[in-house]
Amino acid sequence: MGKVMTRKALLMLAAAAALAGCNKESHTIVAGPPTYDDNVAANANIQLPPSIIATKTYRCADNAVITVNFMSDNKSATVVAEKGAAPIQVTTADPAKPMTAEGGYSVEGSPTSGSAKIAVPGHPAQSCTA
């Protein structure tokens, strides 16, 4: 029985030595709050897109109904020329000039006005009333 115990003891000792050699990586633990100096996104000057400040539905001279969403930057709006159609963004560099987009879209008006001059494809620029 002495030889069996010695073998078991040797096997257990070999297994313990093998396990002790596992995972010998060096770990560094740093205490304290994280620093965000390396985070470029956190340090960037982020500009949010303009929000809608007014939505107006206009009836135009040719009886067309057009919806305009005026944006908070006072330089852009979206135009919906037909029910269910995708909105088209119109813009201007100068708030005193009409907002335009390719394809013949233009809006000349403000979110506080009761009327606007609007052009959409298939309809010339015309006076429209909210």
Image: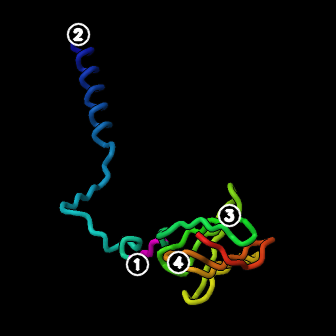
Q: Name the residue at 25% across, 59% down.
A: 28
Indicate the amino acid at tag 4: Ser
Q: Which residue is mark 2?
A: 1
Identify whether 6 is placed above or below 58.
Answer: above
First along the sequence among labels 2 and 4: 2
Identify whether 21 is placed above or below 32.
Answer: above
Indicate the amino acid at tag 2: Met
Q: Nearer the viewer, mark 1 or mark 2?
A: 1
- Drawn side of residue 43 relative to residue 92, left or right: left
**Looking at the image, which residue sits at the far top?**
1
Q: Which residue is mark 4?
A: 113
Q: Which residue is mark 1?
A: 45
Numbered disc 4: secondary structure: loop
* Residue 60 horizontal/vertical position (percent): 69, 70
Q: Nearer the viewer, mark 4 or mark 1?
A: 4
Numbered disc 3: secondary structure: strand
Would you say the magenta stretch is mainly helix, strand or loop? loop
Q: CA distance from mark 1 to mark 2?
A: 79 Å
Q: Name the residue at 27% across, 14% down.
A: 4
The stretch drawn in magenta includes residue 46: yes
* Residue 83 horizontal/vertical position (percent): 68, 56
In the picture, the disc for residue 65 is: 3
Q: Which residues are magenta?
A: 44-49
Q: CA distance from mark 2 to mark 4?
A: 105 Å
Numbered disc 2: secondary structure: loop
Numbered disc 1: secondary structure: loop
Q: CA distance from mark 4 to mark 3?
A: 17 Å
